[in-house]
Image (cartoon, helix red, strand yellow):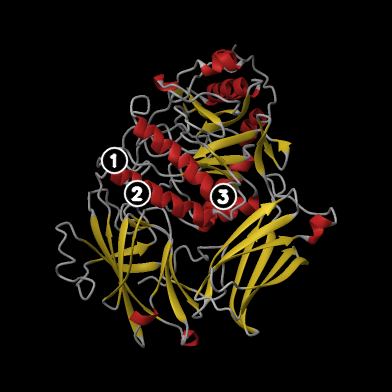
Amino acid sequence: MSTKIPRPEYPRPNFRRNEWLNLNGQWNFAFDDHNIGLREEWYVNHDYQQEITVPYAFQTQLSGIHTNEFHDVVWYERTFMIPDNWQGKQIQLHFGAVDYRATVWVNGRFVTAHEGGHTSFSTDITDALLGGLNKVVVRVEDVSTDLEQPRGKQYWEKESEGIFYTRTTGIWQSVWLEPVNHSFLERVKLTPNIDTGEVTVEYLIQNASDKQELEIEIYSQDLVVAKESCKVNFVQRKNKQVVLLKDFKSGNGKLWSPEQPFLYTVKLFLKEENKLVDKVYSYFGMRKISINNGRIELNNKPYYMKLVLDQGYYPASLLTAPTDEDLKRDIELTKEMGFNGVRKHQKVEEPRYLYWADHLGILVWGEMANSHTFTDKAIKRISSEWQEAIERDYNHPSIIAWVPINESWGVPRLKRDSRQANHLLSMYYLTKSLDQSRLVISNDGWEHTVSDILTIHDYEGEKGVLKERYSKLDSTLKFTPADRLLFVPGFQHKGEPVMVSEFGGIAYQKSEWQGWGYTSAANDQDFIERYYHVVSGLLESPLVQGFCYTQITDVEQEINGLLTYDRKPKVDLSIIREINEGKKLTFTAKN
């Protein structure tokens, strides 16, 4: 087995403890195409014939297997040792994400099950551990053709086609162990308020005691700007403390933005009778996203969003970034091109990406991977997983908008079926009930119900048409993208800001990958001119308050990226930046 651990970085960087053990690397692996593993108790003993590199799905090159054949049930197994200095601790087993339904055993004993391919889960495995060598087994079921499953762009046919790509099955984010005491911090929710200079700290403690206190220390770099101690409420388990930052009180507080992504460090000490029980490190940004008199504002100032669509796929590893550096580099390239944000498309992105977005400064629209049919089961699945995604990623200041549904996926009959419209409406209000600090787009692209922004998908390639369409509100509201109404019958525009949240999609082949786009460019100059026409057409609109260009990279059969699939620029990125900044080019623009 290789001794090099893939993806060695700490997987949950905004809720960090010092001690942990990475379980990425070589695992034993088996396909269970006849679904006999449970009956034969593979979780107790099985002769695994393959190995796989975790956290890469078996469909990827980096997994060491690399096949796109349908294998809907797979099994993983590996052994591990608990470090000697962890003795007497409670041991937590964490999974970043497993697609789609996971069942986990330790030493033949069932410890947990989880459904949802994009969200994290954990379990206490202490009682299942043995002295010395331990064994963890994971069974994963991911039905390739299940359209009730929130699957996003993962295609239900063998070969990728159109806008759909290769599937991801099994463990695709990091697996790790972590020691905690009997009582520990389970979750911390941080909500900044730049208007009052405060941050609300809500905390959930496992096995809380009325003898406990939580000490909160907040740092601006090395300067302590808040230090408070609060008594744990034993009855309610969930506790809240509003903390005033001294630097905001004195008028020297620092805001978070893509231009200046300042982060405050948080240290949390759970103590019981003055003895340290748990210590967690986190961070937050003091930022506010809002709509004021029909204008989108960041930190109480009008802000034009220049986003790029980012699907988070990689040639050798699909949904899993090959390395942490690849996540960082994607954001650096995005900023280099003059974008201030990304719309993560049909993928709940991993926390390490959001960590870099927080630190490097990029706005993120967090989007749910949608199902592709409307049933009771589909409603239950997407609602449950979406709640988990919001809860996990709430503390990241880079996320400024939530997108539960895209282009009526999973709700194709909104005009005729009031039940589907009610589901769309319920997803908006469900999101708002979990998070009132961010914007929510009810159905990105068209057929909105209640929505904080009117978002429109428009792949028109002529500047003159775009300028005319978005010159006045009346002409905009008459537009029917893909022959869809902008609002579901019974709903109408009520002053929401207008953004074109998909546009462009210019195909330009600059690698061995062949494919399609919404329009096509013949050479570098043609590509630059076409990009200039569509971007300047929106920038010159008095109505549009932001855009999202499709897309940052080519993906499989789509070649409409600004970069190739392996992240090579198609043209000089400084030219893309100049266009995004509204600078005029030397050639004569089309009307």
In which quadrant will I find the N terminus?
bottom left
Precedes in sequence: disc 2 or disc 1: 1
Q: Marks 1 and 3: in contact by CB < 8 Å?
A: no
Q: Secondary structure at mark 1?
A: loop
Q: Quadrant of residue 480?
A: top left
Q: Quick check: can you spot residue 318?
A: no
Answer above or below: position of 332 versus 187. above
The dot on residue 381 is 2
Task: For marks 2 and 1, give the CA distance.
Answer: 10 Å
Within 10 angstroms of label 2, few (less than 14), some, or many (20 or more) residues? Answer: some
Q: Secondary structure at mark 2?
A: helix
Within 10 angstroms of label 1, few (less than 14), some, or many (20 or more) residues? Answer: some
Precedes in sequence: disc 3 or disc 2: 3
Disc 1 residue type?
Answer: Thr
Instruction: Return the x and y of residue 307 as percentages of the image width and height.
Output: 58, 36
Residue at left offset 48%, top offset 36%: 442
Q: Quick check: can you spot residue 223?
A: yes
Instruction: Return the x and y of residue 217 as percentages of the image width and height.
Output: 70, 69
Answer above or below: position of 140 versus 18. above
Q: In front of the other: label 3 or label 2?
A: 2
- Left-right relation of 421 to 44: right
- Left-right relation of 492 to 200: left
In which quadrant will I find the C terminus?
top right
Precedes in sequence: disc 3 or disc 1: 3
Task: For marks 3 and 1, give the CA distance.
Answer: 40 Å
Instruction: Return the x and y of residue 556 as percentages of the image width and height.
Output: 38, 39
From the viewer's side, name the closer residue of 193 and 145. 193
The dot on residue 375 is 1
Within 10 angstroms of label 3, few (less than 14), some, or many (20 or more) residues? Answer: some
The dot on residue 329 is 3
Answer above or below: position of 162 versus 183. above
